[in-house]
Each structure stands twice: as C-alpha cells, then as structure tokens.
Image (cartoon, rainbow, N blue to C red):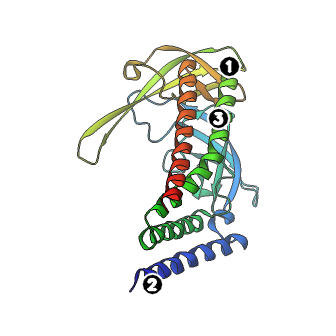
Amino acid sequence: MSLQGYLALWCAVFGTVALVGYARSLAGMTAAQRSVRVMGRIEQVREPRHGSSQRDGIFVVVSFQDPRSGEEFTVTNDSDHGERITAAWTGRDIGVRYPRGRPHAYQFTSDLRAGRRGLGWPNFALFLIYVALVVFAAIDWSWPWALIGFGVPWTLSGVWYVPQSARAVRRRIAALNSCPPVKGRVIAVLTDTDTDSEGGTFTSHTPVIAFTTHEGTAVTAYCPDDLPDATTSHGRDVTIHYDPDDPAVFTPDLASEDRSRLLDITCGTGALALGVAAAVIGAALL
C-alpha cells in the first residue's frame, strides 16, 4: 500500500471515531452526559498521620443527595474515588459524579463542568488526523511543512493561553494579598518512595498544613512546593496567606508566588515565540 493509501486508511478510521463520538455527544448519549453530577458537602475531616503516604489524599466524610430518588448518601474517600482531595474543611462543597442509578460508584471532582460533553476521544481522533496530514505533507511535499504544521496551532494556542494565564496569576496574587495572613502549623510530613524508569528510587515529602482563617474555617491541606526544608518541617509554625473566597488557594511564601508569576509569563511568552518562529521559518523555506 502506498503512503497515500495508509494516510487515507488512517483518516478514515479516526474520522469515523470522531464522527461517531460527535454524533453521540449531540444525541446526549456519552457516558459523561449520562452521569449524574451533584454537589456534596464535607462533614468530617481527619488529619493525615505523619509519615504516611500522600497518594490517598486527606481523609474526609462527604454527604450528597441523589436528585432522582432524593436519598441521602454519606461516603468517604478511603479508596479510589476520583480526584485526590488535597485541601479540606468541614462544610466545604465538593463535586460528586456517578453513573445514573449507581450512586455508590461515585467519583469526586473539583470541577463538575469538566468533560460534561464527552468529547475527549473525538477531539483526540481529530488531533491524530491532523498529525498524519502534517507528517504526510512533510514527507511528500517538503519538510518545512512540518514546521508550519507545528508552528501554526502552537501559536494559536499560545495566543489563547498566555493572556488568560497572566490574568489568572494576577487574580491569584491579588486574592492572596487581600486579607492579613494567619498562623499555621505543619501537622504532618507525608513520605512516598517511588522507582524511576532506570530502577533507581527517589523519595518525596509532602507537608500538611493546618490553619484557621479569619472567618473561623479550620483548613487542612497539602502544602505547595514553596515550603523550604520540607523534610524536617514537621511541627513548624508558618505564616499563611490565603484567598478568603477559597482557602484551598494559599501559600506560606508570597515571594515565591511572584517568582512563579514571572516564570509562568516568561515560559508562556517563550513558547509563543517558538511557535511563531517555526511557522515563519517553515513558510520562508518553502
């Protein structure tokens, strides 16, 4: 079979996958669309044990109501139930989704709107078709088409991402500075040992911080990566800056937030420039 034949077969297979996926989404038949999405409430929070693993998240008890039956359920996250909970307090709202009629197959989620239409696989199929077309153009026409095929979508994504990212970072820093800081304490350091692809082992340490907001909310949360000497931080008192609208957004080091803001904008701008350069160079070499 010729290269054109393989390309046609590739596009036909994944085009069919995309069409079927989009048709199912329009008809409301995807698993994501059929799932029930409700808001639950954290009723109880248990502090992690010092030295335990961070993989399971903070242990919580959550209550939610099935809208079809009106039945109330009280569940925990003591096994694999969706997203790991890394910040918790009594009364916090948390998303819960499950297959229709099967509330015991619940999954926790931080964003109830994410993936509602079930378009992940159809979009991925379209991406594979695009990649095949770029590769074919690079081989059959000339290799600068690969630069154009990479540079144009990369540039468009950068034009969309960079301004939004900059605004999000500015809003985060403004929120962290919007109220006086509070005192917190490292109540545990969680330890995990993993093995890399070469068989070597490495150990990660995750501090857990407890603090009480000015509004009286007692928060237990995994600490971001900006706590110095995390390995020996158990029992340390820290100063916490937090977002009063969402205490899950906090930091013990405002200076690191400023550095991350600069780094994020620099990386985003550099990625955008890379896409523009690839597209321009590819067009110039045609």
What amino acid type should be assigned to the residue bearing mark 2?
Gly
Residue at image position (50%, 81%) is 8
Q: Is residue 37 above or below residue 206?
A: below
Residue at image position (41%, 70%) is 139
State the separation of the CA atoms marked 3 and 1. Answer: 17 Å
Q: Earlier in the sequence, mark 2 or mark 3?
A: 2
Element type at marker 1? loop
Identify residue for label 3: 166
Does residue 114 appear left or right of residue 232 in this picture?
A: right
Identify residue for label 2: 5
Does residue 219 appear left or right of residue 141 in this picture?
A: right
The numbered mark at residue 177 is 1
What amino acid type should be assigned to the residue bearing mark 1?
Asn
As drawn, the residue found furthest toward the left would be: 199
The numbered mark at residue 145 is none
Q: Are marks 1 and 2 in contact (CB under 8 Å)?
A: no
Residue at image position (72%, 71%) is 26
The picture places residue 267, in percent across and down from the top left corner, at 52, 37
Rendered-image quadrant of the N terminus: bottom left
